[in-house]
């Protein structure tokens, strides 16, 4: 569990869900200005749209929640046609969450 004196860090991946292509993958934004997951979730919803699900990983053989997925409508800059952008936000502490790593941050 997160020490409430530590700021939460995140990694962001953006996907064009309409075409099934990556827009940007693995952008590490590093430390956020949030210590509380509820405040981070609210900020992510403002920036990335509606929360549509959770991201999961395995830690010590158990499935745990490590982040969220969001969706919103965007427009292509050249054609102005709409598409659905999906954003994955992963919360982590010192390193990215991977299977059976103790630094995995559970949401």
Image (spheres, rainbow, N blue to C red):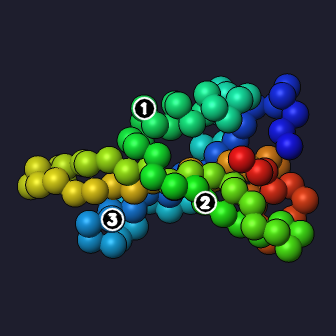
Count of number-bearing discs = 3
Cα–Cα span, label 3 and label 1: 19 Å
In depth, the one of 95 and 87 nearer the eye is 87
Q: Which tag, 2 or 1, sits closer to the chain's start?
A: 1
Kindly report which numbered mark, 2 or 3, lies closer to the viewer in this rendering.
Answer: 2
SS type, badge 3? loop
**Res 55 label:** 2
Look at the picture and state if 44 lies above or below 15: above
Query: What residue is shown with label 1?
Result: 46
Q: Residue at x 38, y 41 (%)?
A: 49
Q: Residue at x 69, y 55 (%)?
A: 66
Query: What residue is shown with label 3?
Result: 17
Look at the picture and state if 13 lies above or below 22: above
Q: Are marks 3 and 1 in contact (CB under 8 Å)?
A: no
Q: Are marks 2 and 1 in contact (CB under 8 Å)?
A: no
Tell me if 3 is positioned left or right of 50 in this view. Answer: right
């Amino acid at each position: 569990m997160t020490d409430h004196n530590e700021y939460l860090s995140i990694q962001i991946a953006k996907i064009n869900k309409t075409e099934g292509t990556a827009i940007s993958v693995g952008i590490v934004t590093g430390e956020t200005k949030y210590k509380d997951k509820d405040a981070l979730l609210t900020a992510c919803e403002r920036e990335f749209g509606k929360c549509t699900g959770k991201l999961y990983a395995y830690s010590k053989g158990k499935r745990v929640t490590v982040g969220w997925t969001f969706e919103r409508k965007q427009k292509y800059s050249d054609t102005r046609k709409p598409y659905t952008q999906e954003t994955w936000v992963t919360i982590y502490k010192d390193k990215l969450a991977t299977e059976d790593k103790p630094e995995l941050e559970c949401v």
